[in-house]
Image: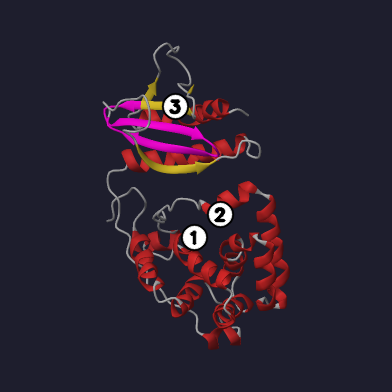
Amino acid sequence: MERIQVLELLYNSISSAMSQCGFEPEYKEGMKKTGCPAYERSDAVVMDFSGDKGVTRFVFSDDRIHLLFAEKDAPRGDDAAFTRDTTYLFVLDEYTERDVKGIATEVNEYMTETFIVKKKTAVKTKNISTVSRAAAKSGALSYDPITFATKLTGIYPELKDELSRNIEEYGEFLCEEFFVSHANAFVERTIKENNPQKMKRLFNVISEIYEDGTNEVQSLIAVTVLGPVLQDAAVVQQVMPYLTDSMLEPVLAVAKKLRKSRSARLRLQNPPKYKPPKPKKPGLMERLMGGGTPGMPMQ
């Protein structure tokens, strides 16, 4: 597919929701004022929607579709007056129409939540608890991402504030944001320094968490934490002595996959934007016990 074809497909899936949000297609001078308003620019393919609330612009350049916003009277010539809000990954030679539909779903949800939903319920910060070594070793519980993050703050105290901020901001622990944006840099620095004492301390924690961890935390370690830094063969060699037998095969397989797949690397660098959990409807038992029926007043 060409970039303009991607935006045409995207337009077909988002035009209705955009209209509901108050944004109609804006056509460049000389264009036929019907259908998709996308046009080619020297550096990108662009598609604009506008209304009383401002201008929404989609800019497709390289392997990314950027969603931008500006005031309704902003100059349209370039993107200088626009503010970038979010970015969607799209690798032309690897992605398909199905991926376009996936992006369209995210755009529709985001626009609806931003421009139609008026009230947002405050998310209460959940009580975050970690798994003790005794519980993990006994098999009663398995290590999880928050326990891994907490143990890393023991090695890197600078991460404590970021961990607290992450939980406070999202109302829960968003592990991809914490590791990709903050913790990974510390891990990478230690590995590249290759100081035996520091390496042993780091991999003692990583190995312990991996050996007695959930599938989620094992995937986090292999893909998100170690995957990016093991793209260099020399780095792989210096890390191998610290990998346990159970870690060796999956970690090296992930590193190989990331080296071969550009789209996989880009996905790792651009984790999905956080979406607050939707409030659950009361179940049948709750309604029978007086919890009320969705949409109906309680007696």
The residue positioned 64% from the left and 63% from the top of the image is: 230
Q: Give the crowd class for mark 3: few <14, some 14-19, many >=20 residues within 10 Å.
A: many
Question: Can residue 251 be seen by looking at this rendering?
Answer: no
The quarter of the picture where residue 209 lies is bottom right
Percent x, y for residue 276?
40, 54
Asked whether 38 or 239 is in front, the reply is 239
The residue positioned 44% from the left and 59% from the top of the image is: 284
Kindly identify the amino acid type of the residue bearing the numbered disc 3.
Met
The quarter of the picture where residue 110 lies is top left
The residue positioned 69% from the left and 77% from the top of the image is: 241
Q: Residue tagged by mark 3?
A: 47
Q: Give the crowd class for mark 1: few <14, some 14-19, many >=20 residues within 10 Å.
A: some
Q: Residue tagged by mark 1?
A: 180
Residue 73's place in the image compared with 148, above or below, is above
Asked whether 182 or 190 is in front, the reply is 190
Percent x, y for residue 119?
27, 48
- Mark 2 and mark 1 residues within 8 Å of each other at the beta carbon: yes
Q: Residue tagged by mark 2?
A: 268
Q: Earlier in the sequence, mark 2 or mark 1?
A: 1
Q: Give the crowd class for mark 2: few <14, some 14-19, many >=20 residues within 10 Å.
A: some
Q: CA distance from mark 2 to mark 3?
A: 27 Å
Residue 285's place in the image compared with 19, above or below, is below
Question: Can residue 106 be seen by looking at this rendering?
Answer: yes
* Chief SS of the magenta region: strand
Q: Give the magenta range.
A: 50-71
Percent x, y for residue 200?
59, 82
Kindly identify the amino acid type of the residue bearing the numbered disc 2.
Leu
